[in-house]
């Protein structure tokens, strides 16, 4: 157990095993309970906090300079922060960036998210790696009054992410069209005015930058809720179907997502492309299984090998579940694997333009090594149109 600093701490992070981490609270006050994960990215804390894939999780940032570039409305991946809270090494300083429109502390407070600074994040990260992603309770009280026993009990009472369908909590309420493209200097976000392909994107918690990448690849994107049926998807007469990222246990979301995907695959030969949870949904639809990882992959420097070309890509990742490559059926080829632990990072059907990856080629935040996957999707739709 850690010891409070000489000055009275205003935040406390309690792990289910009874470990306590004290620090300085900022953002909203109150308590929250979630799974704790760590992210190794050196940039993009705003994109990470607003990534719907982090629903039900508190993020420990291993990089100490969190908050130094402030917050701006252009970098949100969805309308509001989705991660339950954040843990950082150093208390955020005043922002210093020409794009900053707001301070991190104020933004978190306004958006109802709790944070704790002054924590030994290296020790915390080691604990997560050794013991697995723990269940935790995070409390922020300006007066420094904490019922430690109650916090530990709440952490132990958290149900965990296994068996939880969180996609339904972060998906869109109704369908909408997306035409905003990737950010480019000096004009910012442009609009796709001459799309070549119509794509239905199924929203399990889609990041905005993924939708921008589809638009930049020449797609007219129609976004549908996670619970969309095959009839609703195919009613738009799409040239391709995209399966988005998202949070929670893929097996739980698969209860309604897998039948839809299977029916789409049975009724049409259009290209299908999935990312992250969408990758797992496709794998389940094709007959594979998913497993809960010890601590998952969360960062912007993950090496992934393309097993068909030998190329190594540095990628952005955010997932706590993985496709079990040992369960891939005949006719489904493993295309990518993690060079950190060998876990599956990509699949494709042997005889159809149907494929998916675990990592995030939209690079928000992270490197752009894998952006070609969006172009490959567009090329598959073009090839089908001219066949």
Image (spheres, rainbow, N blue to C red):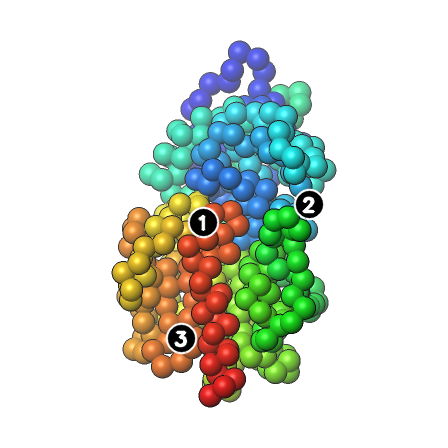
Which residue is labeled 1 in the image? 367
- How far apart marks 1 and 3 lie (CA) works out to 29 Å
Q: Quadrant of residue 25?
A: top right
Give residue 286's mark.
Answer: 3
Mark 2 surroundings: few (<14), some (14-19) or many (≥20) residues within 10 A: few
- Reading the chain from its start, which is encountered first: label 1 or label 2? 2
- Reading the chain from its start, which is encountered first: label 3 or label 2? 2
Is residue 133 shown left or right of residue 194?
A: left
- Reading the chain from its start, which is encountered first: label 1 or label 3? 3
In the depicted structure, whether residue 280 falls above or below residue 343: below
Write the residue at 41% across / 51% down.
Answer: 315
Q: Nearer the viewer, mark 1 or mark 3?
A: 1
Q: Position of residue 310 (x, y in %)?
A: 27, 60
Q: Position of residue 199 (x, y in %)?
A: 58, 73
Give residue 73's mark.
Answer: 2
Q: Nearer the viewer, mark 3 or mark 2?
A: 2
- Secondary structure, mark 3, is loop
Write the residue at 57% across / 46% down.
Answer: 47
Write the residue at 66% across / 51% down.
Answer: 187
Q: Position of residue 218 (x, y in %)?
A: 58, 69
Write the residue at 45% across / 64% down.
Answer: 373
Q: Quadrant of residue 103?
A: top right
- How far apart marks 1 and 2 lie (CA) works out to 21 Å
Q: Residue furthest top?
A: 6
Query: Between 352 and 161, which is closer to the camera in this rendering?
Result: 352
- Secondary structure, mark 1, is loop
Q: How many numbered callouts?
A: 3
């Amino acid at each position: 157990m850690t010891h409070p600093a000489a000055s009275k701490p205003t935040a406390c992070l309690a792990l289910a095993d009874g470990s306590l981490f004290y620090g300085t609270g900022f953002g909203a006050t109150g308590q929250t309970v979630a799974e704790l994960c760590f992210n190794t990215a050196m940039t993009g804390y705003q994109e990470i906090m607003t990534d719907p894939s982090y629903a039900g999780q508190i993020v420990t940032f291993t990089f100490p300079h969190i908050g130094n570039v402030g917050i701006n409305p252009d970098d949100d991946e969805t309308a509001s922060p989705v991660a339950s809270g954040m843990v950082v090494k150093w208390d955020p300083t005043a922002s210093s960036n020409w794009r900053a429109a707001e301070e991190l502390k104020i933004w978190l407070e306004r958006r109802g998210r709790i944070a704790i600074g002054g924590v030994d994040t290296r020790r915390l990260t080691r604990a997560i790696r050794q013991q697995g992603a723990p269940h935790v309770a995070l409390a922020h009280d300006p007066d420094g009054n904490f019922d430690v026993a109650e916090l530990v009990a709440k952490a132990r009472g958290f149900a965990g992410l296994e068996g939880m369908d969180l996609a339904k909590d972060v998906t869109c309420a109704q369908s909408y069209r997306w035409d905003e493209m990737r950010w480019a200097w000096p004009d910012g976000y442009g609009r796709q005015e001459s799309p070549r392909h119509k794509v239905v994107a199924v929203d399990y918690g889609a990041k905005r930058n993924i939708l921008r990448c589809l638009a930049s690849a020449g797609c007219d994107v129609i976004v549908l809720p996670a619970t969309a049926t095959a009839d609703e998807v195919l009613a738009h007469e799409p040239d391709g179907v995209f399966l988005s990222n998202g949070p929670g246990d893929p097996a739980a979301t698969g209860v309604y997502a897998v039948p839809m995907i299977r029916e789409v695959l049975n009724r049409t030969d259009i290209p299908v492309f999935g990312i992250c949870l969408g990758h797992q949904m496709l794998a389940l639809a094709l007959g594979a299984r998913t497993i809960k990882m010890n601590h998952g992959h969360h960062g912007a420097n993950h090496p992934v090998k393309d097993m068909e070309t030998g190329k190594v890509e540095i990628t952005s990742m955010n997932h706590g579940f993985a496709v079990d490559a040992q369960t891939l059926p005949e006719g489904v080829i493993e295309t990518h694997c993690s060079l950190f632990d060998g876990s599956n990072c990509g699949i494709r059907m042997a005889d159809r333009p149907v494929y998916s990856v675990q990592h995030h080629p939209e690079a928000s935040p992270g490197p752009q090594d894998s952006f070609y996957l969006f172009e490959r999707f567009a090329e598959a739709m073009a090839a089908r149109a001219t066949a």
